[in-house]
Amino acid sequence: MYEGLKQHTYQLSKLGSNLNQVLILAHQGKLATIDIMPIKKEIYDIWQLLNKLK
């Protein structure tokens, strides 16, 4: 197993859960706009780390 893989997998899971909650609120009309840029940046950062493991 690669060092840090478990932590990155956990982070991706949390990001997915948070994004899902935001989308549910948006669908219910409780959020008018969604800024997904922070989530996109986190996913990109994790992607870059995982690519270094190859």
Image (spheres, rainbow, N blue to C red):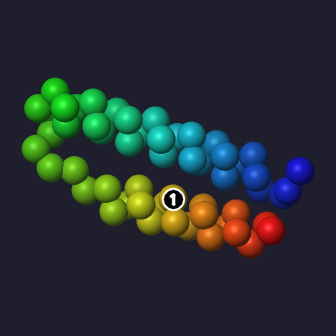
Amino acid type at circle 1 is: Ile
Q: Within the image, what quadrant is residue 23 found in? A: top left
Instruction: Relative to 46, say whether 25 is above or below.
Output: above
Q: Name the quarter where the C terminus is drawn.
A: bottom right
The residue under the point 13% across, 32% down is: 30
Q: Residue at x 34, y 33 (%)?
A: 21
Up-down: is 42 above or below 29?
A: below
User: Which residue reaches farthest front?
Assistant: 54
Residue lying at 22% horizontally and 50% vertically, measured from the top left: 34
Q: Residues within 10 Å of mark 1 (few under 14, many from 20)?
A: some
Check disc 1 and report the residue beneath it: 43
Q: Residue at x 19, y 32 (%)?
A: 27
Task: Give the side of residue 8 with respect to residue 33, left or right.
Answer: right
Q: Quadrant of residue 52?
A: bottom right
Q: Position of 44 compared to 51: left or right?
A: left
Number of disc labels: 1
